[in-house]
């Protein structure tokens, strides 16, 4: 069942160098990163001679049955879990993407969005490049495959310096694993090491915990890390770039609470956000209820700071898949109820504070308030552990266009009335940042305040990307049919 309320995740990337079971460990790494993308998954592995790739639509265990996974041999592997923010949801757009060129075989996994994708793609096509997908990640692959004018590392830096926007990359060649983070550091990427000396790259540190790798450090914004038989080498590709713009929504919602980013545990940051929410919005109430799982930590923090008891009044159904039924009103009514069920005895006759991480379109928040009031709640107060979303994200989060953002088109009281809530409160921007323990200058806050760190042309980009999404592609349909058989590509 599609979540109608929360912004959908973008992607998770993972890579490992120097382990005989690289593909199997990548599988488990992707398992830990499944929350970052649930449309497709893929793994590429190499032993220096063969270069094997398998991709499929669905969740990680669906895409990689044991007989497939065991055929991905070699000590180097990269993996990717995907949710489409550019390019349609088809097998052709699943990653890692690969190319066989004069430099050898190259595979790439990308987390983020390029803001100059349209211009680069037009330029490359004019020079004869042929694209097989509609994702901006393939542009990076084409740049990497171009003939080198200097040393291999110089060509890599040249390619990275041509792309703009948000990107954390894992790149695999026949003999190396490469990690790249954009100069603003929009997306997370960390380096770890296993007991046997193997090095690991991952979007989040929770992937290290699962495979028993030790966290070494975060990859710096603008850094290129090359891991090969000589060890780990670091190159700063953007020494002139000073502004940092890490996506604060990683702390608010996207990252797993057991991950650590910039030396801050995500769970603790979210609890701090809840505490700050209690300081900013004091409400006389009987019970604090989270919307699971996104509101759990903030609701706990609110309860701790306010002294109001915490209750898990909503029970989440963890076995909800996607619905392929037509979106009639009849089905929509069930869609908002099937994911969460309310324990009415915990809220009947009581004043309830319900806490969630965000309101994007508002439809699901309204359904939660309705459920509480139908169960007999005396009052329902809605609190959100981040500021109102008034601007779309162009860096890899599926916030819709501005016309579909509730807070961009309605006043505070109009939203409260739409939700049928007795009160509505958002965490302030200053309070959200303070809860992280980092400076405001560390973050991208564009979806809240409209200050975009990297410029983009929304008219041009949307026109070209949407045109490509709609372009007929017989290859796509063939691959989709082939994916049913889960063949090894």
Image (cartoon, rainbow, N blue to C red):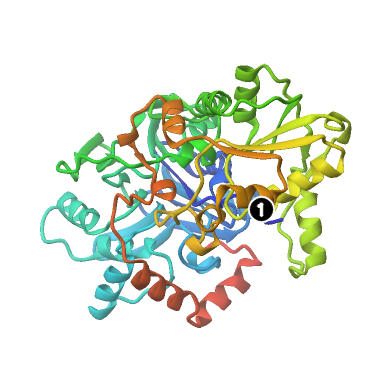
Depth check: 28 or 348 in front?
348
Depth check: 484 or 431 in front?
431
Depth check: 40 or 482 in front?
40
Residue 450 placement, left or right of 8:
left
Q: Position of residue 169 (x, y in %)?
A: 36, 49
Q: Which residue is mark 1?
A: 3
Q: Position of residue 124 (x, y in %)?
A: 26, 73
Quadrant in the rendering for residue 161:
bottom left
Which residue sits at x=57%, y=44%?
Answer: 358
The reply to whether residue 292 is visible in this rendering is no
Helix, strand or loop at label 1? It is loop
Which residue sits at x=74%, y=61%?
Answer: 323
Which residue sits at x=62%, y=73%?
Answer: 481
Quadrant in the rendering for residue 318:
top right
Q: Position of residue 233 (x, y in %)?
A: 23, 36
Q: Position of residue 424 (x, y in %)?
A: 63, 40
């Amino acid at each position: 069942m599609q979540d109608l309320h929360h912004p959908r995740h973008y992607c998770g990337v993972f890579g490992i160098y120097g382990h005989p079971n690289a593909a199997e460990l990548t599988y488990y790494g992707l398992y830990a990163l499944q929350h970052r993308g649930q449309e497709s998954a893929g793994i590429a592995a190499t032993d220096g001679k063969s270069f094997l790739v398998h991709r499929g639509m669905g969740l990680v265990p669906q895409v990689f049955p044991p007989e497939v996974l065991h055929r991905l041999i070699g000590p180097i592997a990269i993996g990717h879990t995907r949710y489409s923010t550019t390019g349609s949801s088809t097998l052709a757009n699943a990653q890692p993407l690969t190319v066989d060129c004069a430099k050898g075989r190259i595979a790439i996994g990308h987390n983020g969005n390029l803001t100059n994708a349209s211009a680069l793609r037009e330029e490359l096509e004019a020079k004869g490049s042929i694209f097989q997908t509609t994702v901006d990640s393939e542009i990076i692959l084409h740049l990497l495959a171009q003939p080198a004018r200097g040393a291999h590392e110089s060509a890599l830096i040249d390619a990275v310096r041509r792309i703009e926007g948000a990107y954390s990359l894992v790149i695999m060649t026949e003999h190396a694993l490469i990690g790249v983070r954009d100069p603003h550091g929009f997306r997370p990427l960390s380096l770890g090491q296993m007991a046997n000396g193997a090095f690991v790259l991952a979007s989040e540190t929770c992937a290290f915990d699962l495979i028993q790798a030790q966290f070494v450090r975060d990859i710096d914004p603008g850094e290129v890390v090359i891991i090969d038989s000589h060890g780990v080498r670091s190159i700063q590709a953007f020494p002139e770039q000073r502004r940092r713009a890490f996506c604060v929504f990683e702390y608010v919602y996207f990252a797993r609470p057991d991950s650590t980013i910039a030396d801050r545990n995500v769970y603790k940051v979210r609890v701090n956000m809840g505490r700050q929410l209690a300081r900013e919005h004091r409400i006389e109430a009987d019970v604090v209820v989270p919307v699971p799982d996104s509101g759990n930590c903030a609701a706990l923090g609110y309860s701790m700071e306010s002294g109001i008891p915490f209750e898990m009044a909503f029970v989440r159904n963890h076995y909800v898949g996607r619905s392929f039924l037509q979106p009639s009103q009849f089905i929509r009514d069930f869609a908002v109820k099937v994911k969460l069920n309310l324990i009415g005895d915990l809220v009947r006759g009581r004043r309830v504070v319900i806490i969630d991480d965000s309101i994007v379109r508002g439809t699901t928040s309204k359904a939660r308030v309705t459920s509480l009031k139908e169960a007999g709640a005396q009052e329902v107060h809605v609190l959100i552990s981040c500021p109102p979303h008034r601007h779309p994200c162009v860096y890899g989060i599926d916030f819709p266009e501005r016309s579909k953002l509730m807070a961009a088109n309605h006043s505070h009281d109009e939203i409260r009335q739409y939700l049928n809530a007795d009160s509505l409160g958002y965490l302030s921007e200053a309070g959200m940042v303070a809860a992280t323990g980092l400076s405001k200058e560390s973050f991208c806050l564009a979806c809240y305040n409209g200050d975009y760190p990297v410029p983009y042309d929304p008219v041009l980009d949307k026109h070209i990307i949407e045109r490509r999404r709609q372009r007929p592609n017989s290859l796509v349909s063939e691959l989709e049919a082939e994916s049913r058989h889960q063949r090894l590509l």
